[in-house]
Image (spheres, grey):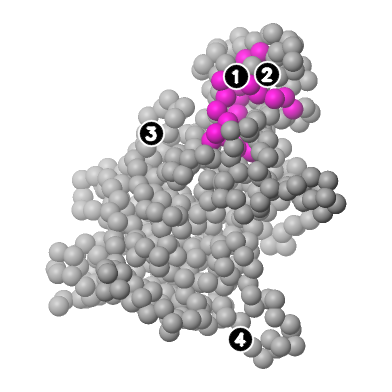
């Protein structure tokens, strides 16, 4: 069998676009979150100006909440806040401690309820929205403009809803459309841990993935296809340093008992380092952090520390990147996360369709508007790098329940080139699934590996 290692691996143009997600040195975590909300609202107000003029002309009145007059039609712009009884609340927890009011369960998979209400806030006041406003999928933190009137009851009767405009993606490169296909492989949830010997099936799956990427599997046609993979993106949860949504049990051990113990993530990172060294010897690899990886929990998660990859970091093909992650490969823009934002947004929505949740973030022009309300993030003062100002070609969310892909048109955008490839990627160790993206036409092919045990 001829190995793809002996074939010439195709190279590609690569442009790192994740610099806005890289935190400055000596970052200040003591600030309040008012700054990020203020910047988000001011930016959204500027982006909404062209949308308002396009729909209602230059004569429509755009007012602040303090200037509203009863029964006068106008447009107001603000940040949505969703009143949800089922959402976790520190105040309700304190009430529960003194037994004045029962507290709902905190482990509910969904916070959305038919009784949820939306209020709109600006820098001064807030007003309850009623009428033509969908409360099921809208969530806290979304900047929007609404057209309507103030009622005598003090509510705002909504007749139309508008979201900030998002610039269209650039046209697909002509060279890719006419030439041979190039591919990018996305995979997530490799989940190296200290119990490698106890889970042989997971080890076999990773072994199959590595050998397939190195061209050791399949016939000549399959090997030539693998040789056209110009980059591998590993989208988080590569090391099981902590359980999803939980704490690291090692940190709960008394210091005098753990003084001579090796942290479990050290052994797991060493195994991952060996895997990445073998892979990056032949193909460029971008490694994103995720929820279970040993890095900061707040978004944006910074690149995993170089000390974890003493072997892989010596190779020029190996790149440690942030989460969220943005890059241009052969002129195709990829934007994606390790999945925390979509997981959190799903709790605030009645739908279980992750593709629809992803589409909503593009429609709203923000990767995760629920930050910092229910998902932690860095307290930016005069910035919000999670604002989407231009549509990507490929938008992915990793570590999702199932595989799904769709070529969608983003609503509320009137310009051309608004179709975006959306990709929901499940954990590799749970599904054996990776995704191969064709850069020529943005088609997605699931690559599924199975063991004898998984076939039964």
Position of residue 215 in the picture relative to residue 271 (left or right): left
Are the residues flagged by discs 3 and 2 in contact, CB closer than 8 Å? Answer: no
- CA separation, marks 1 and 3? 26 Å
The disc placed on residue 131 is 1
Name the spot of residue 322 as percent of width and height, x first: 54, 59
Q: Earlier in the sequence, mark 4 or mark 3?
A: 4
Q: Quadrant of residue 80?
A: top right
Q: Where are the magenta residues, as a range?
A: 126-149
Position of residue 357 in the picture relative to residue 257 (left or right): left
Q: Earlier in the sequence, mark 3 or mark 2?
A: 2
Height in image: 451 above or below 363?
A: below
Q: Secondary structure at mark 1?
A: strand
The disc placed on residue 262 is 4
Quadrant holding the C terminus: bottom left
Are the residues flagged by discs 2 and 1 in contact, CB closer than 8 Å? Answer: yes
- CA separation, marks 1 and 4? 59 Å
Which of the two residues, 284 or 61, is positioned nearer the viewer here? 61
Q: Secondary structure at mark 3?
A: strand
| Closer mark to the observer between disc 1 and disc 3 | 1
């Amino acid at each position: 069998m001829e190995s793809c290692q002996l074939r010439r691996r195709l190279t590609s143009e690569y442009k790192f676009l994740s610099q806005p997600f890289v935190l400055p040195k000596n970052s200040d975590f003591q600030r309040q979150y008012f700054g990020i909300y203020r910047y988000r609202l001011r930016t959204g107000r500027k982006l909404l100006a062209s949308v308002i003029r396009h729909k209602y002309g230059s004569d429509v009145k755009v007012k602040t909440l303090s200037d509203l007059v009863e029964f006068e039609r106008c447009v107001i712009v603000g940040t949505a806040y969703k009143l949800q009884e089922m959402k976790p609340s520190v105040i309700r927890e304190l009430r529960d401690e003194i037994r004045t009011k029962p507290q709902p369960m905190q482990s509910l998979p969904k916070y959305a309820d038919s009784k949820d209400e939306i209020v709109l806030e600006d820098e001064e006041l807030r007003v309850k929205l009623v009428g033509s406003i969908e409360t099921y999928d809208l969530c806290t933190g979304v900047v929007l403009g609404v057209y309507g009137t103030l009622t005598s009851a003090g509510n705002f009767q909504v007749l139309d809803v508008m979201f900030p405009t998002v610039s269209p993606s650039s046209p697909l490169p002509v060279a890719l459309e006419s030439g041979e296909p190039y591919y990018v492989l996305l995979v997530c949830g490799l989940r190296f841990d200290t119990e490698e010997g106890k889970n042989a099936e997971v080890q076999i799956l990773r072994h199959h993935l590595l050998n397939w990427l190195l061209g050791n599997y399949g016939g000549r046609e399959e090997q030539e296809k693998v040789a056209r993979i110009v980059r591998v993106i590993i989208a988080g949860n590569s090391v099981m340093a902590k359980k999803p949504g939980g704490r690291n049990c090692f940190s709960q051990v008394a210091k005098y008992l753990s003084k001579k113990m090796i942290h479990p993530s050290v052994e797991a990172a060493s195994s991952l380092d060996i895997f990445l060294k073998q892979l990056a010897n032949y193909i460029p690899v971008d490694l994103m952090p995720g929820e279970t990886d040993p890095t900061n929990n707040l978004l944006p998660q910074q690149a995993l520390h170089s000390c974890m990859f003493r072997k892989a970091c010596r190779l020029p093909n190996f790149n440690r990147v942030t989460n969220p992650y943005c890059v241009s490969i052969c002129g195709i823009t990829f934007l994606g996360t390790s999945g925390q934002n979509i997981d959190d947004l799903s709790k605030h929505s009645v739908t279980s369709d992750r593709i629809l949740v992803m589409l909503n973030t593009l429609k709203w022009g923000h990767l995760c508007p629920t930050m910092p309300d229910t998902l932690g993030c860095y307290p930016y003062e005069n910035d919000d790098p999670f604002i989407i100002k231009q549509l990507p070609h490929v938008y992915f969310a990793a570590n999702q329940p199932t595989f799904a892909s769709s070529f969608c048109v983003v609503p509320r955008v009137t310009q051309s080139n608004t179709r975006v490839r959306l990709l929901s990627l499940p954990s590799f160790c749970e599904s054996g699934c990776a995704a191969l993206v064709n850069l020529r036409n943005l088609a997605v092919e699931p690559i599924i590996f199975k063991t004898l045990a998984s076939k039964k």
